[in-house]
Image: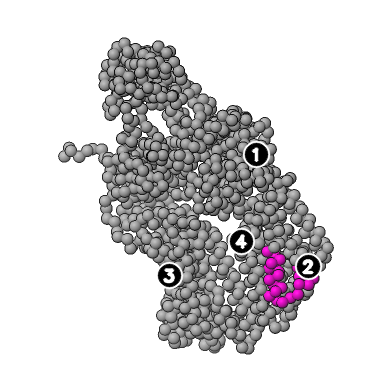
Amino acid sequence: MSIAPFVFTSTLQDMLRPKRFAIWVIVAIAMVVLGQVFLRFTPTSTSTTAYSTLSELIVFRILALAAAIFATGVVSQEVEQKTIVYLLTRPVPRPVLILARTLAASVTVSIVGILAAVGTALGTRASFGDLFLRDCSALILGAFAYCALFVLVSLLINKSMVINLIFAFGYEAAVPKMPGDIYKVSINSYLMSIASHPKIAPVTSDAAPVATPAAVNTIQPGAAWLAMIGLVVLCSMFNAQWFDRNEYVPREDGD
Amino acid sequence: MTAVGFVSYAGELSGMPPAEALRRAHEVLEYCGLGEARYRNVETYSTGMKQRIKLAQALVHGPKLLLLDEPTNGLDPRGREEMLDLVRSVSHGRGVNVIVSSHLLPDIERVCDRVIVVIKGKLRTAGTIKDLKKLAGQPADVELREPNVAFANMLMEKGLTVTPPKGNIYRVQSELPPEELLRVVQRTALESGAQVRGFETAVRTLEEVFLEALTA
Amino acid sequence: MIQIENASRWFGQVIGVNDVTHTIEPGVTALLGMNGAGKSTLLRLITGQIQPTTGSIKVFGNEPFANPEVYKRMGYCPEIDQFYEHKTGRQFVNYLARLAGMSAAEAKSRTDEVLHEVGMADRADKKLAGYSKGMRQRIKLAQAILHDPDIILLDEPLNGLDPVGRREFMSYLHTLAERGKTILVSSHILFEVEQMTKSIMLLHRGRLLAAGDVSLIREYIDKYPHRVRIETPQPREVAAKLIQLPYVLKVEFDEWRGGIELQTRELNQFFAFLPTLTTEENFTITGFSSPDNNLESIFHYLIE
Amino acid sequence: MSNIKPIADLSYRNYDGPLKKPGSRWWVIAKNGIRIALKKMALWGLMFVSAWYYLVMLVVLFFVQQITSSNPAGAQAMKAFMERLVWPDQFLHGFSYAQLPMLIIALMLGAGSIANDNRANAMLVYLSKPCDKREYLFGKWIGIALPILVIMVVPTIIFYAYGALTFREYGFLKDAWLLPKMLVIIPIAAIFHASIVVGISSMFNQARNASATYAGIYFITNFFTLLMGGIWASSRGETPFPVKHLFYASIDGVLIGACKAIIGTKGSAPFGIQSQGGMSQVPAPAVVPILGVALLISVVFVLIAWRKIRAVEVIG
């Protein structure tokens, strides 16, 4: 088991490498600008409501997007670029390999989320109070949940990035707003209950509704924490077993 | 893109009128042994066929100078043989000058007449392969069925210089003409109980030429 | 030691390897075959990247699939040309050394050592993206011999190397084999394989067509009797003499280069008789050789 | 007669036929690109989709005509409807609703144009032929611009001909310069789309990544327009400075703005529906700056492509 720390640190270093991570820093800076612009053009909103709106509308989307991108870096990108052969023929037990790499991805995505949240808070001049702290815990838990899930998808399907993106932008955006209990089947609802943003004033206009009010979310934060941790553990156990049993050889004309 | 499409496209890119390009594409694909696969999509081609279609698209507009970079790269033994024969058939007596660059020196020996050795950007050796491979003093390579020390010693007693064997091949140096030398060698072999399996005038391999040029 | 028993493996309907049984002994063994004969599949089976559909493969006595124990003592140089382009050669080898379980210090020293052995000590600090094909190959070779494995599997190891590099690596393989390591080399360059080893495994359309010592295999190809070429200014007279011999099957005259070429199944008897021609009956023969006594012809005869 | 050998020598023979001088290769490349694209069935479908506004208008106008001719009471309603129709706006809507399908067509034609060559390092094949970088880039560019130009021009001319013939008395020909103006903006749109796609395609070596990036840029900038539109609508009165211009800061926004400027209309709701306010009535930008922006973006992307096209990948 002693090899696990190295696998984790080397993957983390690889993911935080400037050329690859810079884009997310730029995104955080963009959030600062967007926060300012949003504040100026919606005189009716205070900094907390502005922060909540932007956080819910954009920061959690960025989290899901980053998770989709970094999760593919754990396995499927290596398989596609055929460099997986170097990892699979090393004396490293496969469960250790995949769990340590997923952990590294989750940490990276958490950093991305928190950076974006900090940017939004600066932009909207919101205080770093308990709303911000709740947001951070939701973001970190969300990072782990999304990464575990997207790695699972990448193990089962080879062109998984597209599916993960559709899930992150389509499913996660639409389902939490649906009436009835269906919102309980989307990670975002649980994250929202953990973050528990104050009710946001709807910004409506007849042209295109920019932000609709969130459906009534009856999940208790405690239950949300349990659900998320459960999801992470379940996915990780599945990933470890599945990766250990199956073949990961790049597809080309089977010589 | 089909093979014919690709090669005729390359032809047009070289300035051939469309009709000529298509006619010539069929002809060139036939030379390169891709006749029956000409209508297949190029993406479905094996590495061997891809090497040959690269040659085809280079030949389509009837070039006078052909530059080939590692033509036998990634080919299996039969593929390499066919490619080398192809390059030979295209160049010798057809007015097409070919420059081949390859790390596989035996392939070069099979296809080329002249060699240029470039080391660190400078021209070190040049000349026809026949001359470069000649060894001074016309020594002979004697191959025995299995190594035999007695045989070597006896030869030396008879005043012939024998270099230490590589495997079971002894290099013998003498002033005698080849047929005389062979008789001496065979008589010695009978006396020492060895069996001679091969007797040829020794030549330097291109690799030796290359290594020598490197250290010169 | 690698034991393969009735191993086969399919990809959907495409046959990769079909019922191969063989034991690979220490020393250098060459894995030969046309493109698509199943070489890569067999290598992937031995390196445990894939599992056999039927039969079994044992490396050091246990299953290689996803088995860290086996990988501790196995080195693999894959055929692919893909790397972590953003890393430098040294970082890449060092990364794999750490993954092989070495401590930071151990990995560093071993990396330097290995880079020196493959002649990359001074050029290993550039990004892999800018490496020539030969340099990338040397880095791949370096990571294969990193943890001093007992079994080394090499897929087209000399691909892209210059003649000097090829010569150096072949002699290096030789020294490793002498230290009792089991080396399996898959290659298309037969005249190099000939210089590396005598024992081959020939795959054809997934089946193991021939395995063992090359000269032994040559004996069993009875469809193609041995050829001997004789350079002589008196081809007709020598031919007349040779036809009397019962074991000489065929004699051909080579119009283009002069001299004659004959076929026989009894090489020993023929070569025992040959000296009498030159010494007693005074025929002038300037030389003779057996043109098909090389791996290329054997490969050609077997695959036809 | 007998000296002609009965059996032909089919071994390699040289080609000494005519070889055109360099300078005509761009058409070879363009023709090849278009031929490959035309094989994709989806392209034909998209062609019709891109003209959907004109088709719908034709159907609407046809029925309006039928109803009124059958009973006089209807004539009254038709006259009112016809008066309300601002013809230039119909072309504006026809043009703007065509932009999204145009984007997809441009991607289908061009996303792989240079990207695939990068991956298969086919640049060696192209540039080892008597065909230099200028011709290569121009050929690829025309291969995208020309089809887009044709796909946009044809429905516009059909609709114009139909309108001119049947609705002359309803002031269809009031603005005599309407068709020439359209024939100015459409080529600009074709240049704009082709340049961006060529530029983005040269940055990747997979068509997939190129299309994804371009689609990404499109939606992000579009989201931006949506936001600005929303703000403009909600603050009905004066329009704060940045909004009027930022509204056009998206890929199709630039083109729509340029079209408005050239046609010289403030814009109105589609299909002659009565409605005030709303996004479609954001005032038109000034002609010169918006065209300048469009051409500037095109030039920038073409330069990106020019720099990216290299026969030999020189890595530092």
Q: Chain of mark 1?
A: C
Which of discs 4 and 2 lies nearer the camera? The answer is: 4
Residue bearing the label numbered 2: A134
Colouring scheme, one of rainbow, by chain, secondary structure, one colour: one colour
Residue bearing the label numbered 4: A18
Residue bearing the label numbered 3: D150
Residue B81 is marked as none
- Between disc 4 and disc 2, whose residue precedes? 4
Mark 3–mark 1 contact, CB under 8 Å?
no
Q: Range of the magenta residues?
A: A112-135
Which residue is drawn at the image coordinates 78% and 69% (left, top)? Answer: A196
- Type of the residue with mark 4: Pro
Which of discs 4 and 1 lies nearer the camera? The answer is: 4
Q: Position of residue D305 (x, y in %)?
A: 46, 64
User: Counting other residues with Cα less than 10 Å from the Cα at mark 1, is it few (<14), some (14-19), or many (20 or more)?
Assistant: many
Q: CA distance from mark 4 to mark 3?
A: 45 Å
Q: Quadrant of residue A31?
A: bottom right
Residue bearing the label numbered 1: C71
Residues marked 3 and 1, same chain: no
- Type of the residue with mark 1: Tyr
